[in-house]
């Protein structure tokens, strides 16, 4: 199977009415990672232009239960809001990406080290023998190509994600920042992503001694 190929038995689509409006939803099973992923398409996507796209990594605690220790849920909301505001766009929801790919049990185990020993999101994973990031964005690339999308404006703060898509032949014509406000619960996670994972988070202020500063104020 080539990069563009998703077998007929591995994909299905239907309308999905949500509180934000009616999306076209595409569920597909990726032949490489074996996971079932979901795409939400809003409006009339013009594949000859750069499409507004969010490639979102599954985070059950943040996305479904609105956990405040990470910003996943708020980013998911903000991306969907932006797509609806623009009138068209695509959200690719990638399963199997919990805790940057280490899985849900491992992620929650790492939370214990964060809460009880003050480790950050990276050190808590490595202390348990887990890799920092094992996410594979191949399924997103395959489904975008399947949908005829070759160029995107990617809603992300993560340059590595841009590189991952581009290295597989998706043009990232622009990176659209997806900045959610910091709070006392997520500030340490956000500053770690900024300082140790290279995420572009210019809205964060200084942070020291467990207190949240303010950016430019
Ligand atoms: Zn999360």
Image: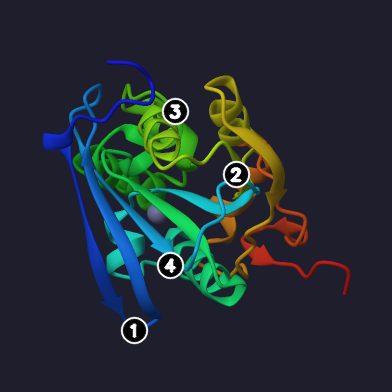
Camera-near label (1 vs 2) is 1
The residue lying furthest to the bottom in this view is: 19
Compared across the picture, whether 92 is left or right of 177 comes to: left
Q: What element carries label 3?
A: loop
Q: What label sits on residue 68 in the rendered view?
A: 4
Which residue occupies the foreground of this view, 60 or 87? Answer: 87
Residue of label 1: 19
Asked if marks 4 and 2 touch (Cβ < 8 Å), the reply is no
Asked if marks 3 and 1 touch (Cβ < 8 Å), the reply is no
Location of the N terminus by quadrant is: top left
Residue of label 2: 192
Location of the C terminus by quadrant is: bottom right
Asked if marks 1 and 2 touch (Cβ < 8 Å), the reply is no
The residue lying furthest to the left in this view is: 9
> Which corner quadrant of the figure contains ligand 1?
bottom left
- Mark 2 Cα-neighbour bin, 10 Å: few <14, some 14–19, many ≥20: some
Residue of label 3: 132
Which residue occupies the foreground of this view, 92 or 62? Answer: 92
């Amino acid at each position: 199977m080539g990069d563009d190929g998703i077998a007929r038995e591995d994909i299905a689509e239907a309308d999905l009415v949500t509180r934000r409006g009616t999306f076209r939803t595409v569920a597909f099973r990726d032949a490489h990672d074996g996971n079932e992923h979901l795409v939400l398409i809003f409006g009339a996507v013009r594949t000859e232009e750069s499409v507004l796209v969010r490639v979102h990594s599954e985070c059950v605690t943040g996305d479904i239960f609105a956990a405040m220790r990470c910003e996943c849920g708020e980013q998911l909301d903000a991306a969907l809001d932006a797509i609806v505001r623009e009138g068209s766009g695509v959200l690719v929801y990638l399963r199997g990406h919990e805790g940057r790919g280490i899985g849900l049990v491992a992620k929650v185990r790492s939370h214990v080290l964060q809460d009880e020993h003050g480790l950050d999101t990276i050190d808590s994973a490595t202390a348990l023998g887990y890799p920092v990031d094992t996410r594979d964005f191949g399924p997103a690339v395959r489904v975008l190509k399947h949908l005829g999308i070759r160029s995107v404006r990617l809603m992300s703060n993560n340059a590595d994600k841009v590189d991952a898509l581009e290295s597989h032949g998706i043009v990232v014509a622009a990176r659209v920042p997806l900045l959610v406000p910091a709070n006392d619960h997520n500030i340490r996670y956000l500053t770690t992503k900024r300082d140790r994972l290279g995420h572009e988070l210019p809205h964060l202020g200084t942070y020291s001694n467990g207190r949240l500063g303010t950016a430019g104020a």
